[in-house]
Image: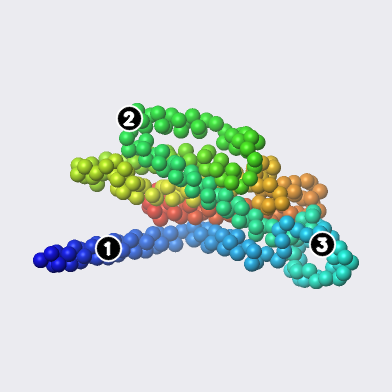
Amino acid sequence: MAELKLNSNNDYSLAESAEYSDTFTKKLKVFWRRLRKNKLAVMGMFVLIILYSLAIFAPLIAPYSYEGTMDDIFQADRAPSFKSYEEYDMNGELVMWKPNYFGRDEMGRDVFTRCLYAGRISLTVGFVSVGIAVIIGTVWGCIAGYYGGWIDNIMMRIVDALNTIPVFILLITVMAIFKPNIFNIMIVLGLVNWTSIARFVRADFLSLIRRDFAEAAKCIGAKDARIIFRHILPNAMGPIIVSATMGIANAILMESAMSFFGLGVQPPTPSWGNMLTNAQELNTMLLSPWKAFYPGMLIFITVLSFNFFGDGLRDALDPRLKQ
């Protein structure tokens, strides 16, 4: 009898697991069907896949060292070319040089190589900093939206106070106090960009907490943490994902701006922002425009792709938001 009961429980668990898997597959198909209707979102997604692939495999793709060598000095300010060429090195020997697809900078470093490695920095900063912001903002919004009342009032007044501080001025102040490096940049960007996510999560919780499934969970005596993270939060993931996608684009812009002003990633490590710093003089813009064009264009393409993809995610995850 006990064996029969055990088998019955196992059959029920397997059936429940199969039903969940089938439901998830159906939801995924519906999501993809909605997303692919937005051609700009699909284009943005594929561009981001390409950019992340180039950044990940930069050591295999890059033809030169991003730090440059003594021999590179003799190739300073060389225009872009797609052909190999012969040139003398510092020892006076004639050597064959690989193509310079994006040209070379004032120190002879290959701009294409530096753009690839800079992409690793900029994309990593965007992804990690938004991850920090999502964790803080989600927890903050969950607590404020679930408990409401005076707890909600106090927590959201803190958010309002933080929103009155100019973000970029705060970033400059903090990075002037602490050593500017990639770790500090990710932490600081994450700590200043969570308030908008907290607002989205709180707004969803205020709506979802009144739904039947939340009331039923309370009636059966489920603990607050279980109701928040098991029942309500999964239904609020759509806006969080969309906000995070948009936030990555914003974080990349902030990191680029900070690096441009010398408060971000420090040379010789390249980022798209500090590459623009070296190309800000008028003579450079006129005589060697490729130094600013390629990193600037990569920032533009990356941010635009994230925005297109974020809009598509918004429409696919919640069609009611589509205008």
Read off the residue under disc 2: 149
Residue 290 drawn above or below residue 220: below
3D distance between C-alphas at marks 1 and 2: 39 Å
The secondary element bearing badge 2 is classed as helix
Q: Residue at x 65, y 59 (%)?
A: 116
Residue 42 drawn above or below residue 272: below
Find residue 216 and report its horizontal and vertical position in percent: 21, 44
In the image, 228: left or right of 262? left
In the image, 269: left or right of 107? left
Find residue 26 and report its horizontal and vertical position in percent: 33, 63
**Farthest front residue?**
2
Q: Is residue 3 visible?
A: yes
Of pointers 2 and 3, the one earlier in the residue sequence: 3
Q: Residue at x 79, y 58 (%)?
A: 108
Q: Residue at x 71, y 51 (%)?
A: 268
The quarter of the picture where residue 55 lies is bottom right
Q: Residue at x 78, y 46 (%)?
A: 281
The quarter of the picture where residue 205 lies is top left
**Farthest right residue?**
92
Quadrant location, the N terminus:
bottom left
Please state the total of marks drawn on the protein image: 3
3D distance between C-alphas at marks 2 and 3: 68 Å
The secondary element bearing badge 1 is classed as helix
Q: Amino acid at mark 2?
A: Gly
In the image, 323 versus 298, the foreground residue is 298
Read off the residue under disc 3: 71
The mark closer to the camera, 2 or 3, is 3
In the image, 219 versus 319, the foreground residue is 219
Disc assigned to residue 17: 1
In the image, 87: left or right of 241? right
